Image (cartoon, rainbow, N blue to C red):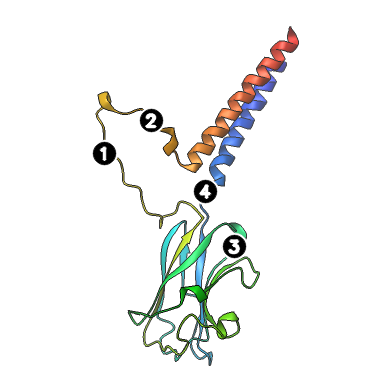
């Protein structure tokens, strides 16, 4: 009777551990919001956003900034990504004004939890920040109709923006090569490891009870 209870408890633990292994590698979703105002605060946009669903390249576009005479505050905040996934990063790829790419000094862009609010910020220019005296872009750039920012997120894993893997060509059954476990994803590998550990625990518990009875 005791053996049955032990086996039932270990089996339940195995299911729980397996579920945890899958969830650990599930990509989170975060909103990447534009923070923009010209120096006079006459033109602002704090609402335009794009949803970050995993690793990959994203583009955030705003037409609400039309008419801005310059950059006063120009940042992207990926809300709570630093708090939820501190290992994740983002890199600015491109800035376009009115359909044309404008140059920027990649070495002067500031990244991270700059305001210590748990957000991952890409600071392109901020008249109240460190980029004021060492601007990565021409702060005097005016905007006629639109602003577009492209950036790449890494360290989240998965996601719709992650490049899809090309499906391998079908191989006839008689010549199909043996499965290569080294190509398993991190999530699959960890789930398999969790299940294996659980099975080992079951076997160990059963052996201990059997030895004790003897």
The residue indicated by pointer 1 is 169
Residue under the point 45% across and 57% down: 55
Instruction: Mark yes or no: residue 172 visible.
Output: yes
128 with respect to 179 (left or right): right
Seen from this angle, which residue lies furthest front? 107
What's the CA distance linking mark 3 and mark 1?
39 Å
**Which label's residue is closer to the chain start, 3 or 1?**
3
**Which label's residue is closer to the chain start, 2 or 3?**
3
Determine whether 164 is above or below 97 in the image. above
**Which label's residue is closer to the chain start, 4 or 3?**
4
What's the CA distance linking mark 2 and mark 1?
14 Å
Secondary element under disc 2, as helix, strand or loop, is: loop
> Where the C terminus falls, by quadrant?
top right
58 with respect to 134 (left or right): left
Marking on residue 179: 2
**Which label's residue is closer to the chain start, 2 or 1?**
1
Marking on residue 82: 3
**Which label's residue is closer to the chain start, 4 or 2?**
4
What's the CA distance linking mark 4 and mark 3?
16 Å
Residue under the point 56% across and 31% down: 195
Secondary element under disc 1, as helix, strand or loop, is: loop
- Around disc 2, counting alpha carbons within 10 Å, would you say few (fewer than 14), some (14 to 19), or many (20 or more)? few
Secondary element under disc 4, as helix, strand or loop, is: loop
124 with respect to 8 (left or right): left
Marking on residue 26: 4
**Which label's residue is closer to the chain start, 4 or 1?**
4
182 with respect to 205 (left or right): left
Residue under the point 49% across and 86% down: 71
């Amino acid at each position: 009777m005791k053996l049955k209870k032990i086996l039932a408890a270990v089996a339940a633990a195995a299911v729980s551990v397996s579920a945890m292994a899958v969830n650990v590698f599930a990509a989170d979703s975060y909103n990447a919001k534009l923070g923009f105002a010209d120096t006079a605060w006459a033109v602002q946009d704090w609402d335009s956003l794009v949803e970050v669903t995993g690793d990959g390249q994203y583009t955030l576009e705003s037409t609400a900034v039309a008419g801005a005479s310059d950059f006063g505050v120009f940042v992207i905040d990926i809300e709570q990504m630093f708090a939820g996934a501190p290992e994740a990063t983002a890199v600015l790829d491109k800035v376009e004004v009115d359909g044309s790419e404008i140059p920027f000094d990649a070495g002067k862009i500031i990244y991270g939890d700059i305001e210590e609010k748990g957000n991952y910020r890409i600071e392109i220019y901020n008249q109240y920040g460190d980029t004021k005296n060492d601007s990565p872009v021409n702060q005097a750039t005016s905007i006629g109709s639109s602003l577009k920012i492209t950036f790449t997120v890494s360290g989240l894993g998965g996601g719709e923006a992650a490049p899809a893997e090309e499906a391998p060509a079908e191989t006839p059954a008689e010549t199909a090569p043996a499965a290569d476990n080294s190509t398993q994803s991190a999530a699959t590998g960890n789930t398999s490891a969790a299940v294996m550990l659980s099975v080992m625990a079951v076997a160990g518990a059963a052996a201990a009870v059997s030895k004790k009875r003897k």
